[in-house]
Amino acid sequence: MTEDGRKLLIVEDDPGLLNQLKWCFDGYEVVTAEDRTSAINELRRHEPAVVLQDLGLPPQPEGVEEGLATLQDILRLSPHTKVIVVTGHGDQQNALRSVALGAYDFYQKPVDTDTLKLIVDRAFNMGELEAENRRLQSLAGDSPLDGIVAASDGMRHVCRMIEKIAPTNVSTLLLGESGTGKELLARALHRLSPRGENRFVAINCAAIPENLLESELFGYEKGAFTGAVKQTPGKIEMAHHGTLFLDEIGDMPMALQAKLLRFLQERVIERVGGREEISVDVRVVCATNQNPVQLIDQGMFREDLYYRISEITIDIPPLRDRDEGRLILARTLLNKFAKQQGRPINGFSKDACDAIEAYKWPGNVRELENKIKGAVIMAEGKQVTAMDLGLPAGDAEPESLNLREVRQNAESRAIRMALMRNYGNISRTAEELGVTRPTLYDLLNKYGLSAEAYSKRNVVGED
């Protein structure tokens, strides 16, 4: 989106300051208002993405109550609008009140046009990013990859692999830490496959006692053991013509691994206590949070079974390695849970955004979901804060003390974040980074980055 296509509503009753602001933002489509009534009218007529609003509005220009009421009316009618409030010099208390009510940011007089333009530009960039994310959300119901945010290079690669192998019948092994979304990806693989109309049957090999796991998988005949009062098909049989998902297969007992291997080779099973061979047509997808090679070396996993289940292996990156995707995923989850709980929450405060970026997320996406769901319930204002999330502010620690490596990592991350915010637009990315276009091209080559990978058409949405 060019600056000319960006609508900015300026709510200001001082004619001199209003003219100064109109001149400052002459590259935008500027709409003006002098009081609450006209501001709401212009909001409804033009639907601006960003509002720059003075807190001192008539009929009480010396107070802030009319300005705060205007802010609340704007956010009630258009909760995704980014409102930047302008307060008097030193009036930090009312600025913070505005942010608590849902304002995106604040600026204190006297006005420095360069600084104010930077704040407004950032608000537009954030609004465009969130709008694109909502658009992708609206398509989620039609997407087989429903539920997956792929805003980072690692997750985009995972989604491309899922799309490529889904039409085939290869056995797939998903490797990733707990909470990274292995079952979500397995379900996406099933929905994209020709078996998508049939059953997806999941079983957690670590959650079922060893003496029951065999009968759960293979079923049993009547009288096979005490309590077996009728013939019961197992999970493998139930998944006939569909997909069988074996989660945490690294915890499967060695004796049962041999029986599973025979099934994978012969595609027939025998129920516990039975002698009849039953043919089963099923696609097998496995997952584990352990290193299967280490398990083999420790004698805890059969090497022949490993090769049978890992015709294709997909490594799922942990949340801490999804730099560009963490905040997008967090906002997606916030919108989802706020809607579920009926809470009028429209975003994260700055300290919450910083905390989400800094925290290491040992529990991955599952931990993020839990914290945001709790924060939506506990939040007292229009925005979720770091305290609501139960996260410390500025928790990041440098991974290396080598200055060259620290500089390179920081430079690479800044470039990737700027590309993500600007959807790969070279000119705007260079401007945000404070470098020339040729310098940016040199940096992209240096770090092996592609602006095209961050363009809007290459972003994949997630619920």
Image (cartoon, grey):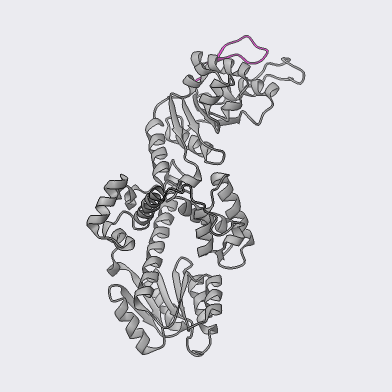
As drawn, 360 above or below 348: above
The magenta segment is 268-281
Depth check, front residue: 140 or 171: 171
Depth check, front residue: 110 or 12: 110
Asked where in the image residue 135 lies, by quadrant, the reply is: bottom left
User: Can residue 376 be seen?
Assistant: no
Q: Position of residue 37 (x, y in %)?
A: 46, 83
What residue sits 77% from the left and 18% below the top? 226
Q: Position of residue 311 (x, y in %)?
A: 43, 23
| Residue 433 lies within the magenta run | no
Q: Residue furthest right?
A: 226
What residue sits 41% from the left and 62% below the top? 126
Magenta stretch, main secondary structure, is loop
| Residue 273 lies within the magenta run | yes
User: Can residue 440 be seen?
Assistant: yes
Compared across the picture, whether 167 is left or right of 288 comes to left
What residue sits 39% from the left and 79% below the top? 10
Q: Position of residue 31 (x, y in %)?
A: 35, 78
